[in-house]
Image: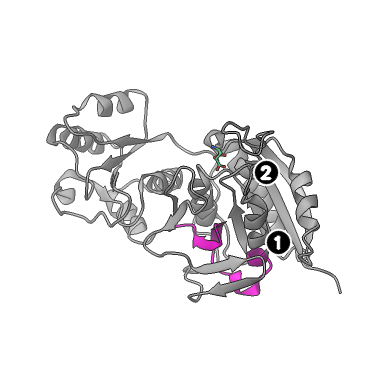
Amino acid sequence: MAFPKLLVLGTGGTIAGAARSATGKSYGAGEVAIDAIVSEVARLGLDVELVAKTIARIGSQDIGWDQWDALHREIAAAQGDDSIAGIIVTHGTDTAEETAYLLDLTLAAGKPVVLVGAMRPTDAVGSDGMRNFANAVQVARDDRAAHRGVMVVMGDAVFAAPDVRKAATSNINAFRGFPRGPIALATPSSIDWFAPPHREGSSARFAWPEALPRVAILTAGAGMDAKPVEALLGIGCKGIVIAGMGQGNAPRVVLDALADAVRSGVPVVRSTRVDEGLVDRNVEVDDDANGFVASRALGPAKARMLLMMLIASGITDQERIQANFDRP
Ligand code: GLU
């Protein structure tokens, strides 16, 4: 019997990292070729055929348009290829949430698409890469993973793209989900789903754009003034996400400058620098009067991705932007 075929797209990260010491601290992300990783996985006896392709060999802090464009093209083609059962993307953990969410917004929901990374390089003692990869294989080949959009597999847990974020710098259980926690638990020998597929509709929510606009995240800090907002407008930002205090608050002078930005045609989304929780409209900040959008469940990194997609799709008015944040 033929084994299911999975496409593996390598981008780098710690899952492809090498330290050349089992106990050392420093290492290089993306140094191990995806073919080498895939041949190691093939030895695990997972009854699957893996076809590897290199997109990049970088730390995901350097990921951007070129890699996203290539990933989107390859995954969309694989989704239309009947011989491929699912797609795995190996990715650095720093920005896995951004890539996962961008792809989730722009790909059909049919075949499983799974991002997987690691917190420890391939040659570190207790490296988590092989296990996470084996878990990702379980998800990508599972029929029940279909129609769930893009997922991130880390530390035996499966997260949906709109929920997932990196919450610890080095712990192997570094990922959390909000508002939903893991949607499944996966190990190399088992997978347990906790809920039916949640994604609305199976077609892509946004067409893949020609380019993404410059949108900045500005973190609010006590005692700050309005100069950083002016600086962002000065470099031509097309949108601003404020990582505000608490429920997306910021000093009055900053909010006044952001309201000016909205009046000049630059959409402003209020998110939060707090780890978790909703940012709702019109709590302490008068969003109606200022023309702001409340990010609801999206933290700053994913709020920026959604705002970029909306602006790239020609959606710049407050009401329609808010409607999209109400449905992340
Ligand atoms: N900063 C690198 C990256 O995100 C390594 C971190 C990791 O993959 O865990 O690719």
Vertical placement of 54 versus 184: above or below? Answer: above
Label 2 beta carbon within 8 A of ligand 1: no
Residue 122's disc number: 2
Q: Image check: 72 left or right of 323?
A: right
| Identity of the residue drawn at 56% across and 74% down | 192
Q: Position of residue 60 (x, y in %)?
A: 56, 38
Q: Is residue 110 magenta?
A: no
Magenta stretch, residue numbers:
138-162
Viewer-nearest residue: 129 or 123: 123
Label 1 beta carbon within 8 A of ligand 1: no
Assess disc 2: are there few (<14), some (14-19) or many (≥20) residues with their C-alpha within 10 Å of its C-alpha: many
Helix, strand or loop under label 2: loop
| Identity of the residue drawn at 25% across and 36% down | 220
Residue, far right: 1
Looking at the image, what colour scheme do you see?
A: one colour
Q: Give the mark, 2 or 1, whose residue is nearer the N terminus.
A: 1
Distance Cα–Cα, label 2 vs label 1: 32 Å
- Specify the quadrant of the image occupied by residue 62: top right
Vertical placement of 142 versus 56: above or below? Answer: below
Visible in this render: residue 111?
no
Quarter placement of the N terminus: bottom right
Residue at numbered disc 1: 80
Helix, strand or loop under label 1: loop
Residue type at mark 1?
Gly
Vertical placement of 144 versus 255: above or below? Answer: below
